[in-house]
Image (cartoon, helix red, strand yellow):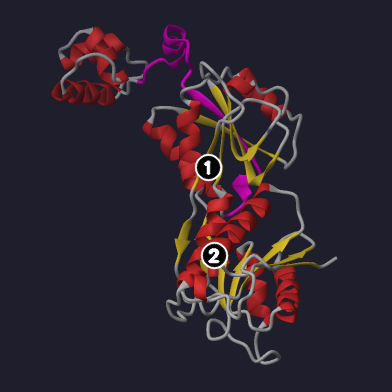
Amino acid sequence: MARENAGIREVAAAAGVSVTTVSHALSGRGQVSDETKRRVKAAADSLGYAPNRIARALRSQRSNLLGFVSEEIATTPYAGQILVGAQEAAAELGLMLMIVNVKRGTIDDPQIDALVAQQVDAMIYASSSHRVIRVPPKLDPARTVLVDAYDPAITSPAVVPDELGIGLLATRRLLEAGHRRIVHLTVDEDVPAVDGRERGYLEAMDEAGCPPVVVRVPGPATAGAGYTAIGRALETDGDLTGIFAFNDQMAMGVYQAVGPDRDLSIPRDLSVVGVDDLRLIADALRPGLSTVALPHAEMGRRAVELASRLPLAKPRRDQVLRLPGRLIERESIRQLGSLPIRDASGGGENPSAGATVTVS
């Protein structure tokens, strides 16, 4: 039967071991056999014993607490996986997360002050979308990990998606399916995701010897933006067969734009790849949308692993960990064949000659 305020000596007596052995068995330190660990844990559980976190923190000079500042990711369906991954990693490492949710762009917030006052070992600051931010000045850069964000003014390590790799992955998938007239639909915004995915697209098209076509429309990257962009793309190149959309919402706009009015269908006439793997969109569209899933859960896990080792001995400004996306295949890509890539641009065209269309 559990006893209120049971102490470590009572656990030691119940398990038939020394107090030191109990401490080592429950903390994972020292040489303790698996059988002894099981016996100590069973005794601790039966007595309702929990180690005194404050006393342990005084001995180790670590609280085993991590602060987690969520910049609206807790209310964003896909980015919320960052928090899931972080919680899983924290549990595995024996750490506890203290989580607060703040508005996008927050610099000063009493919730952040409260976290700092808790003497947490390190902070994780997670953005709801990949962008350059200004870290709140009350956070110590040497003890802060950024997620889905980057602050060039400080030396905090950052965990972000590999945006260039995502652009390469999506475009190469269309190329592998035999498509050579591929357009990239994007928005005219100065954020890392826009720049990186476009550079990945251009690199893939260049290595294939195919002329790129980039259509940029005013942001944000919504279904309406995708609808506008595909209309302009078809005006620019009526022979295109492949579409790499900046995200799933813009891809949904492509679905809305094709139909009886244009006598086009997906994937018969147009093959489409998006980014995000937003289930409410990708699974609901017919045919299902092939898309590149962002590594949100893994980003959360890696952030906790980094935070558990802070402060780093030699912080650097280039500590940016870029994690790859994962292609989720559904039914929006038609296989045209496996034409030799360098022979597909046709008619002696200059492979590097392409078009960039900006809609104001």
Quarter occupied by the N terminus:
top left
For label 1, the SS is strand
Relative to 94, residue 323 above or below: below
Residue 263, given in percent of the width and then of the height, sits at 65, 92
Instruction: Based on the picture, tell me whether residue 245 belongs to the magenta stretch.
Output: no
For label 2, the SS is helix
- Which residue sits at x=37%, y=16%? 5
Relative to 306, residue 163 above or below: below
- Where on the picture, by quarter, is residue 123? top right
- Where on the picture, by quarter, is residue 284? bottom right
The residue beneath circle 2 is 171
Q: Nearer the viewer, residue 10 or 105?
A: 105
What's drawn in magenta, residue-wise? 50-77
The residue beneath circle 1 is 322
Q: Work out whether residue 100 can be spotted.
A: yes
Foreground mark, 2 or 1?
A: 2
Residue 78, given in percent of the width and then of the height, sits at 56, 54
Instruction: Based on the picture, tell me whether residue 55 belongs to the magenta stretch.
Output: yes
- Relative to residue 360, is residue 326 drawn left or right? left
Q: Residues within 10 Å of mark 2 (few under 14, many from 20)?
A: many
Q: Amino acid at mark 1?
A: Arg
Q: Amino acid at mark 2?
A: Thr
